């Protein structure tokens, strides 16, 4: 039997002002910042063990500056826009066995308003996938985690400067209880980070031109030993005996 839907929504509008006094290297202007944010979470359980969640967030931040001293050069008026989505599935078999998979998608745009600087209006898209699980049904069970993310920066007026970076990370943790007082933890981390220029072909598809790649492998182990506690008995002697 399907469970009920649950919806949570929040919205905020924050305004702040800052004054920068005139100095030798700059200053002499005031800046107003207004941030509008709205987000919501939709949750639906499927039975007693499976839960699906969808979270969305959208925000717009505006920066407006004005000169307060003669000869001051206030920053360029600009807007920062961001929207993100996260879809997550959780599976709970018991307290000792659970797993989850999540997909994150985000879009960020930095917009400079004057037409004299159109080449500095980048658009950044981010897609991330992660999965994690915990298995404690027996001693020495590994717990694998996989994470993947991609970041694409697009300059609408300077396509030759578009770039793409990818990030793949895999973490495996092994916990073994050797004796009631001795525990062994081993963690292996493998990370691959390729990046390069992003080109849009004539047929509309995209291609990555690799420029560099980073590979990192780490192995961490920890041994924990808890000594046995001895109980001491206290004896009281009555004076005169």
Image (spheres, rainbow, N blue to C red):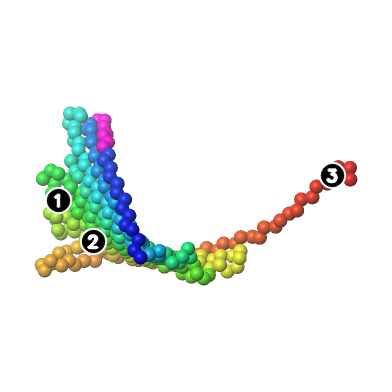
| Quarter where residue 53 is shown | bottom left
Residue toward you, 48 or 194: 48
Per the image, label 2 sits on a secondary structure element best described as strand
Residue toward you, 13 or 152: 13
Residue toward you, 190 or 71: 190
Residue occupying the point 56% across, 65% down: 183
Residue occupying the point 19% across, 52% down: 122
Q: Which mark is residue 119?
A: 1
The answer to whether residue 83 is left or right of residue 138 is left
Residue occupying the point 11% across, 68% down: 203
Q: CA distance from mark 1 to mark 3?
A: 92 Å
The residue where tag 3 is placed is 238
**Res. 185 visible in picture:** yes
Q: Pointer 1: residues within 10 angstroms few (<14), some, or many (20+)?
A: some
Question: Which span is picked out in magenta?
Answer: 15-24
Q: Where does residue 33 sit, x and y in percent of width and height?
A: 24, 38
Q: Which mark is residue 164?
A: 2
The answer to whether residue 149 is left or right of residue 154 is right
Q: Where does residue 133 sit, x and y in percent of width and height?
A: 41, 65
**Mark 3 or 2, nearer chain start:** 2
Image quarter where the N terminus lies is: bottom left
Image quarter where the C terminus lies is: top right
**Mark 1 or 3, nearer chain start:** 1
Q: CA distance from mark 1 to mark 2?
A: 18 Å
Q: CA distance from mark 3 to mark 2?
A: 83 Å
Q: Confirm whether the magenta stretch covers residue 29.
A: no
Q: Is residue 183 above or below residue 6?
A: below
Per the image, label 1 sits on a secondary structure element best described as helix
| Quarter where residue 31 is shown | top left
């Amino acid at each position: 039997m399907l469970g009920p839907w649950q919806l949570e929504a929040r919205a905020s509008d924050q305004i702040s002002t800052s004054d920068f006094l005139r100095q030798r290297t700059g200053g002499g202007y005031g800046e107003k910042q207004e941030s509008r944010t709205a987000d919501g979470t939709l949750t639906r359980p499927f039975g007693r063990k499976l839960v699906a969640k969808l979270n969305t967030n959208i925000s717009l931040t505006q920066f407006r500056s004005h000169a307060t001293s003669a000869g001051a050069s206030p920053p360029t008026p600009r807007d920062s826009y961001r929207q993100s989505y996260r879809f997550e599935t959780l599976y709970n078999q018991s307290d000792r066995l659970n797993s989850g998979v999540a997909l994150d998608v985000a879009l960020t745009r930095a917009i400079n308003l004057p037409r004299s600087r159109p080449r500095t209006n980048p658009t950044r898209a981010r897609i991330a996938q992660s999965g994690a699980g915990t298995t404690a049904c027996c001693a020495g069970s590994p717990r694998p985690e996989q994470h993947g993310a991609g970041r694409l920066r697009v300059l609408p007026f300077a396509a030759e400067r578009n770039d793409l970076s990818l990030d793949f990370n895999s973490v495996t943790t092994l916990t073994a209880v050797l004796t009631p007082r001795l525990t062994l933890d081993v963690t292996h981390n493998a990370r691959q980070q390729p990046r390069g220029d992003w080109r849009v072909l004539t047929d509309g598809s995209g291609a990555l031109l690799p420029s560099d790649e980073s590979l990192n492998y780490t192995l961490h182990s920890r041994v924990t030993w808890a000594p046995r506690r001895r109980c001491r008995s206290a004896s009281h002697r009555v004076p005169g005996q």
